[in-house]
Amino acid sequence: MGAAPARVVVGVTGATGAVYAVRLLDRLRAAGRETHVVVSPAGVLNVHHELGLDRKAFEALADVAHSPADVGASIASGSFATEAMVIAPCSMKTLASVALGLSDNLISRAADVTLKERRRLVLMVRETPFNLAHLRNMTSVTEMGGVIYPPLPAFYHRPQSIDELVDDTVERVLALLDVAQAAPKSWAGL
């Protein structure tokens, strides 16, 4: 039996931070991963507002694009082999849906499948400050095996631009996915 295809699912929701999804898709492609993207309607609004891209232009960054309403898509089944899923950015609504196992659209269904198959799920949650419901939902997803990764910037490497901050965060996510080509800047000590 051959190795499973190197596939990563990327969900994009209505929280701010669409640039993380774009950079993640670029880096996954460079690392030889087949990418499957699902963008919620609010995610499309943010992609357009923050980056000036329409749905078609954004979806062209992935190998395969799925409609968020298509709960019968390949990525909705555990028999469809994937390495991992990242929701970048992840709204609190999507976090709640994943935490409660609602599977009410393809993003939360694919996340549910990722968890049930014991694959890596990373949620780049984007809203602050957190209220108690947010924290409880993050705890719930963590207890199920997911990784909560708010895209908080590191400054010890003295970034000179927003692009450097975004790149460092994305490289850290790639490292969480065990992508060999990941190149996060590491702390060397004082």
Image (spheres, helix red, strand yellow):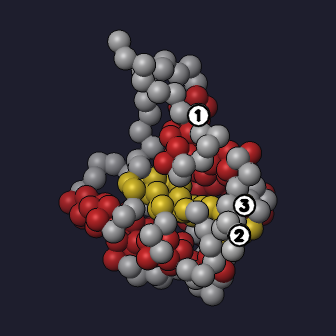
Give the residue at x 52% y 44%.
175
Above/below status of 100 relative to 122: below
SS at circle 2: loop
Mark found first going from the N terminus, 1 or 3: 3
Give the residue at x 51% y 28%.
185
Mark found first going from the N terminus, 1 or 2: 2
SS at circle 1: loop
Q: Residues within 10 Å of mark 2 (few under 14, many from 20)?
A: few
Callout in the foreground (1, 2) = 2
Q: Are marks 3 and 2 in contact (CB under 8 Å)?
A: no
SS at circle 3: strand
Q: CA distance from mark 1 to mark 2?
A: 28 Å
Q: Which residue is mark 3?
A: 34
Q: Which residue is mark 1?
A: 183
Q: Tag 1: residue type?
A: Ala
Q: Residues within 10 Å of mark 1 (few under 14, many from 20)?
A: some
Which labelled disc corresponds to residue 2? Answer: 2
Q: Is residue 34 left or right of residue 127?
A: right
Mark found first going from the N terminus, 3 or 2: 2
Q: Residue 106 placed where, x, y %? A: 56, 77
Q: CA distance from mark 3 to mark 2?
A: 16 Å
Above/below status of 189 relative to 121: above
